[in-house]
Image (cartoon, helix red, strand yellow):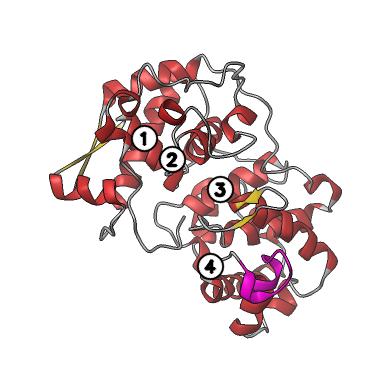
Amino acid sequence: MSVSIEFNKCEEVGKIVRDLVLKKHGHISENLASTDPETGALILFYVTAICHQTRKLRNDEENLVGWDYLKNRFEKAVVETSFLSPSNLKKQLVNNVALFLQKLFSVDGKPENTTLTRTKERARLLIDCAAKLDEKYGGKVLTLTKESGGVLPQLYAMLEEFEAYKDPLKKKSSVLIRCLSDAKLFKMADPENFVPVVDYHMMRVLLRMGCIKPSGAKLIKKLTCFQKVSTDEQFRLSAQYAFRIISRVSGKSLFELNDVFWALGRSCCHYKTQLCTDKKCSKNPCTFAEVVEAPDHSHCLFETVCLGAARKEYRQLKEPNVNTSFY
């Protein structure tokens, strides 16, 4: 499996990003101001731990999907019940926690109507998080971060103790660090050591733009048809490098790029619809328009440099299809 980084295309994209005017976007830390710092940190710790492969997670009545739906429900559940306190959660059976999640993410509270998949897996991750947090850090997320001294390599290593945060490419760990930082619950001593966040939305966008390029007809067919691949490591490593190039050229931080490309893939460059050809976004309101000033949103701001806008074979590419709990 070979995936290359297209440096010239990354630079072209970086120049577009450089001119984007970003809005102050609160999808990560909004509503946490009403909670005490430790409760807010615990909410983010839990939500990030189980935020992976959420394509089917949705609540149409409240127009909530994925991360937003997870965070909305955990903000209420952590505050309103003691079930999710680390000291209690660590003692629960996997089936009990799975049932709790099924009810929590069901419009009518009936577990059979949940849109959250892999609930037993997520339950195991939550129980592990609670147990280790309680035993090693007195059940306090902010004790964990304080003991790191704000040094990112140290914090990344400490987070790897938790099953949910074992990803060698550190996606969930970086998301948590970014969330805590945005919520003013953590200050990085060495932001230069922040590892770029890469998820399936962002890989899809980079593939379609042509910033990262797979080689071999067999691999390209698997990406086009969304067939299983054995590993996604080269895609993720290439994407991390591509984002560093785009950040350097654009002058935008990796945090800001996370917002831009995550929002773009979540709405304008979705796996089902694309703004460049369908003339509509997958989400309403469009998540990209919520993070970027885009007064004329009838076309994609990247159309002039995106290979997918002009070429169907690029536009048909999707993210690598793997079984993972890393993102």
- Residue under circle 1? 206
Q: Whole-Å distance between the Cαs marked 3 and 4?
A: 21 Å
Query: Residue 93: horizontal and vertical position, in percent?
Result: 63, 85
Note whether 93 is above or below 191 in the view shown: below
Residue type for callout 1: Leu
Residue type for callout 2: Met
Query: Residue 120: horizontal and vertical position, in percent?
Result: 54, 76
Residue located at (76% from left, 75% from top)? 83
Note whether 212 is above or below 160 in the view shown: above
Query: Residue 203: horizontal and vertical position, in percent?
Result: 38, 42
Residue stretch in magenta: 102-114
Local secondary structure at mark 1: helix
Earlier sequence position, callout 2 versus callout 3 = 3
Local secondary structure at mark 4: loop
Earlier sequence position, callout 1 versus callout 4 = 4
Asked if residue 146 can be seen in this view, the reply is no
Residue 183 in which image quadrant = top right
Residue 252 falls left or right of residue 135:
left
Mark count: 4
Residue type for callout 4: Thr
Earlier sequence position, callout 3 versus callout 1 = 3
- Residue under circle 3? 175
Q: Whole-Å distance between the Cαs marked 2 and 3?
A: 13 Å
Note whether 123 is above or below 57 in the view shown: below
Residue located at (59% from left, 56% from top)? 48
Note whether 269 is above or below 102 in the view shown: above
Q: Whole-Å distance between the Cαs marked 1 and 4?
A: 27 Å
Q: Whole-Å distance between the Cαs marked 2 and 1?
A: 6 Å
4 vs 2, front mark: 4
2 vs 3, front mark: 2
Marks 2 and 1 close (CB-CB < 8 Å): yes
Residue 239 falls left or right of residue 89:
left
